[in-house]
Image: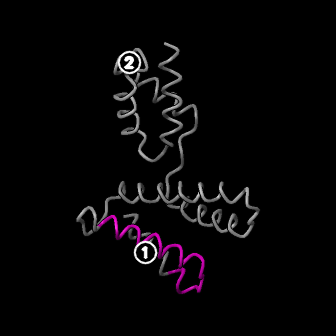
Amino acid sequence: MLEEKIYQDYIVALKAKDQKRSSFLSFIRAALKNVAIDLKKDKLEDSDVFAVLKKQKKQLEDTKESMLSSGRDDLIKNAEDEIEILQAYLPNLLNEQELTKIIDQVIADLNAQSVKDMGPVMKEILSRVGVRADSKIVSNFVRQKLSSQ
């Protein structure tokens, strides 16, 4: 289980006195605990953990973007370090070719004809790719494909 791996890595970071890593993993563990409480579960499924991690990564990327204009290199570096820690727990993203193949397959399977069919197409694609693709990128590709039909 991914939640258990995060806990084990947290313990290792504590023992190694890696303050930055242990602090960030503690933060992630707290976020996971809050989600577990909200979902009324003792243990989270990996899909729930991935959702939390993906959300945290998105927030960090937004923070990094907003800090670029401020010139706060220390905060930018901190956000990059935390994104790197998160990336170790997230699956590798699909490349453009793999994603296009899945999109084309779903459009064919659902016999989607126009942008009006985007909802069911997106739902099916996101269920197939899970956290291995950014939903905004998927949405842009689907809209582009369905607009050209």
Q: Quadrant of the N terminus?
A: bottom left
Instruction: Name which residue lies at 37% across and 22% down.
Output: 117
Figure label count: 2
Counting residues from the start of the chain, the first of labels 1 and 2 encountered is 1
Q: Is residue 20 magenta?
A: yes
Q: Give amino acid for label 2.
A: Ala
Residue 100, above or below 116: below
Give the secondary structure at mark 1.
helix
| Alpha carbon separation for disc pair 1 and 2 | 44 Å
Residue 37, above or below 135: below
Pick the residue in front: 142 or 69.
Answer: 69
Q: At which x and y percent is residue 135?
A: 47, 40
- Which mark is on residue 7? 1
Pick the residue in front: 104 or 61.
Answer: 61
Q: Residue furthest left?
A: 40
Q: Residue 82 sits in which quadrant?
A: bottom right
Instruction: Name which residue lies at 34% across and 21% down.
Output: 110
Instruction: Name which residue lies at 38% across and 18% down.
Output: 112
Give the secondary structure at mark 2.
loop
Residue 51 is left or right of residue 68, and the answer is: left
Q: Give amino acid for label 1.
A: Tyr
Q: Is residue 77 magenta?
A: no
Q: Residue 124 sits in which quadrant?
A: top left
Residue 142, above or below 57: above
Q: Which residue is mark 2?
A: 112
Residue 3 is left or right of residue 85, and the answer is: left
Residue 29 is left or right of residue 45, and the answer is: right
The region drawn magenta spans 12-36
Instruction: Name which residue lies at 53% across and 78% down.
Output: 23
